[in-house]
Image (spheres, rainbow, N blue to C red):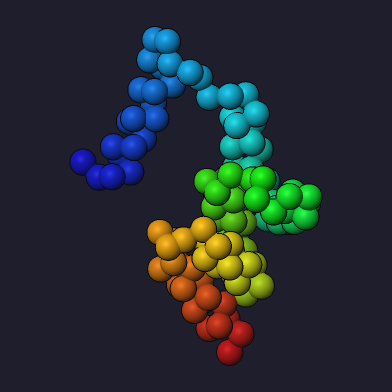
Amino acid sequence: MSEITRVTREMIFSTYEEGASRIPDPVRDFVEKITFASPEDIISALHDVMAEDWMAMPVWARNLAYRLACLQRPDDPELLRNAAADLLSFGPDWDDFAEDLKARAAQLEK
């Protein structure tokens, strides 16, 4: 079984276990909204909340937001560099991904 399958199953079981804490409504709403948001809306939200308090947004939410924006705008070197910088701020677990993003941004600018 792959790692993603394992953690997916754990997530499913955790949300349905008797007595388990449910996913908070604001977290569920965030995931739902960010999943279908335009890259412009995602980037705007990231800028807005980070301007208010750079550390307030949970790392998992930042990673998801940047990932979804980058998937929708894979040819935007500025976005790729911003996503890389954010990953590097919370590494080292994601340093390899950040370096890949920086390399893609540099390649796009050639």
- Nearest the viewer among 80 and 57 is 57
Q: Position of residue 39 (x, y in %)?
A: 68, 55
At 60% from the left and 72% from the top, the residue drawn is 81
Classify the position of the N terminus by image quarter: top left
Identity of the residue furthest to the bottom in this view: 110
Q: Is residue 57 above or below residue 20?
A: below
Q: Position of residue 65 (x, y in %)?
A: 60, 50
Residue 1 visible in this rendered orientation of the protein: yes
Residue 95 occupies quadrant: bottom left
Q: Position of residue 82 (x, y in %)?
A: 63, 67
Question: For this view, does 69 lie left or right of residue 92?
Answer: right
Residue 76 visible in this rendered orientation of the protein: no
Count the marks: 0
- Nearest the viewer among 35 and 17 is 17
Question: For this view, does 89 lie left or right of residue 42?
Answer: left
Question: For this view, does 30 lie left or right of residue 52?
Answer: left
At 67% from the left and 45% from the top, the residue drawn is 56
Identity of the residue furthest to the top in this view: 18
Q: Is residue 32 above or below residue 25?
A: below
Classify the position of the C terminus by image quarter: bottom right
Q: Is residue 41 above or below residue 9?
A: below
Question: For this view, does 66 lie left or right of residue 7?
Answer: right
At 42% from the left and 10% from the top, the residue drawn is 19
Q: Position of residue 59 (x, y in %)?
A: 55, 49
